[in-house]
Amino acid sequence: MKSVTWKAPAINTVFYRFDESEVRFILQYGRPFSPMSPWGIEGGGPLNAQQIDTLLAYLKSIQIPREDCIVADAKPLNCEGGHLPVVEQDKIQAVAEKSVADGTYGSIGEALFNLELGSGGFSCARCHTPGWSWGEPGQTGSGAYGWNLTGGATNSHFGTEQEMINFIKAGSKFGAKYGVQGQGSGRMPGFGDLLTAEQIQQIVNYVRNEL
């Protein structure tokens, strides 16, 4: 059996990407086709509801504090409306720009899509490119845990560019309609609190026009 090294995504930004109910579901049932095992009794794991609550509280306590919360004196770890600190967003941009400058990628959008910073916690390729999570990526965006984005697929799923931007910002909500005929599963994280509007635009340009 072949041995691989799996890249586990950063968890100090998990509540930027998912809400509490979604993180709870991931902890309870794990992630199929990955080393992330179910930890809740509901999914066959060892932890009861109180223990999952304790784990959720701990995860909240280690989140990167947010900037620009809607309520000025709100707790920055989990405040409403806050976003990743600008200094962290600048780091993301710097890594993307460097990988374009050194010829690794052809555009900022492609670099952001494949960003390895935070073990893929800020990127799209982690879920949408087969083999990315264990260092043997297949065709970029051809589908893995997330669906196939190549060959104009996103143009069919989203009637307009703005619809796709809104979806990437918010992520999918369980049962909610998105795009042309999509229904949310809750698996697609939201990136609106992590990336800047310009960075999301660059990703959309890449996916819709280059993949």
Image (cartoon, rainbow, N blue to C red):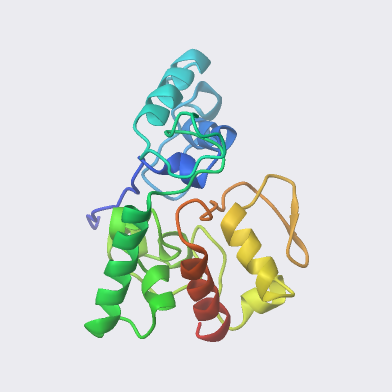
Residue furthest front in the image:
72
> In the figure, 30 relative to 94: above or below?
above
In this rendering, does residue 17 appear at all?
yes
Where does residue 45 sit, x and y in percent of width and height? 45, 25
- Note whether 145 is above or below 15 in the view shown: below
Q: Please tell me in which quadrant of the rendered image residue 136 appears.
A: bottom left
Residue 58, placed above or below residue 70: above
Q: Is residue 193 left or right of residue 156?
A: left
Question: Left or right of 166: which side holds 139?
Answer: left
Q: Quadrant of residue 35?
A: top left
**Nearer to the camera, 93 or 175:** 93
Query: Is 107 left or right of 42, judged from the image as shown?
Result: left
Nearer the observer, 9 or 164:
164
Q: Quadrant where the N terminus lies?
A: bottom left
Could you tell me which residue is drawn at 65 percent across and 49 percent down? 185
Q: Position of residue 137 (x, y in %)?
A: 34, 70
